[in-house]
Image (tube, grey):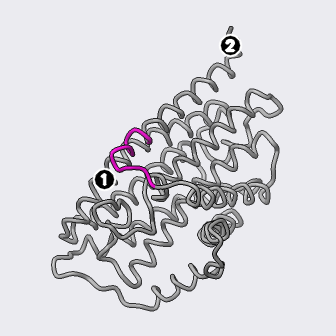
Amino acid sequence: MVSLILILFVALMQPGLIARTRARLSGRKGVPFYQHLNNVGVLLRKDPIYGASAGMVTRLAPVVYLGATVTAALLLPVGGFGALLSFDGDIVLFCYLLGLGRLALMLGAMDAGSSFQGMGASREALYGAFVEPALFLVLGTLALVSGQIRFDGLFSQVVSGRPEMFVVMILMMYALFKIVLVEAGRIPVDDPRTHLELTMIHEVMVLDYAGFDMALITLSGWIKTALLSIIGASALASVLEGTAPVIVLLALMFALLIGVLESTMARSRLSRNTTYIMTIVALAFVIFTIAFLVMREVSIG
């Protein structure tokens, strides 16, 4: 139960940290740290509004998205606090649960009958097909170096004290940071602040959602970002023998880095996103290869 509480804590703190970092670096006072919580609170008190062509899929998509994301959170331990659900192969279920949430959101966008939302769903499907292999490779690398296929042993069984393994985990944390940028729809792949339908990806899929449904989608996105951040933080903490507070701080560092990135970079052209995501897959494959060589004690040179 403690692990779930820590995951939710990270999920609720990251958006505020991103907004404050972005405001400070741009020389603005910015909104209060807790403004995103107020916004979701307002949405929770409003009734959802559906278009004339929206069907049952549109109504169920936010619930399925949140349910899949929360279930994925039940599988993830944080430091010494075990997961609420744990079994062999749960790392595979974790990836499929995130994929289920993405699928639900895409189906809801297409069911709404909007051409813009269908366009966003097609882009999400393309980027998801590219980024999911990278996530599988990252978790496969952790399984390789730990000898475990369940989250409860994935981080605790990593061989620490070796400089090669420290390098592997640093690279893995970097790869997960780039995966977070794609999954969360952040710069340089997407910009959550834009409302130009022809350039949006995630935001255009939820244009027809409002009120309670929009609150569920927003919360689900926060939790998914927190999950990926905690995996990256746990990977680095596994070689540093860090505890749960260290993992939480490292996960919050993801939000700080996102804020810095969005203050110093512009969004990439849409045509370059595919190449950007494929570099993440290539990076994940390189990490897996390096980890394989380290575990086999193969010398290079």
Above or below, 121 relative to 90? below
Name the residue rendered at 45%, 69% in the picture. 193
Question: Closest to the observer: 108 or 23?
Answer: 23
Question: Closest to the observer: 61 or 249?
Answer: 249
Task: Categorize mark 1 by other alpha carbons within 10 Å: few (<14), some (14-19), many (20+).
Answer: some
Looking at the rendering, the stretch of residues picked out in magenta corresponds to 267-276
From this viewpoint, is residue 173 visible? yes
Q: In what element is the residue under mark 2? A: loop
Question: Closest to the observer: 265 or 17?
Answer: 265
Q: Position of residue 7 (x, y in %)?
A: 64, 64
Q: How many marks?
A: 2
Task: Categorize mark 2 by other alpha carbons within 10 Å: few (<14), some (14-19), many (20+).
Answer: few
Question: Closest to the observer: 149 or 242?
Answer: 242
Left or right: residue 285 compared with residue 172: left
Does the magenta segment cover residue 271? yes
- The residue tagged 1 is 123
Q: Position of residue 301 (x, y in %)?
A: 68, 8
Q: Which mark is residue 298?
A: 2
Above or below, 252 relative to 279? below
Name the residue rendered at 27%, 66% in the picture. 109
Name the residue rendered at 54%, 66% in the picture. 222
Left or right: residue 110 compared with residue 220: left
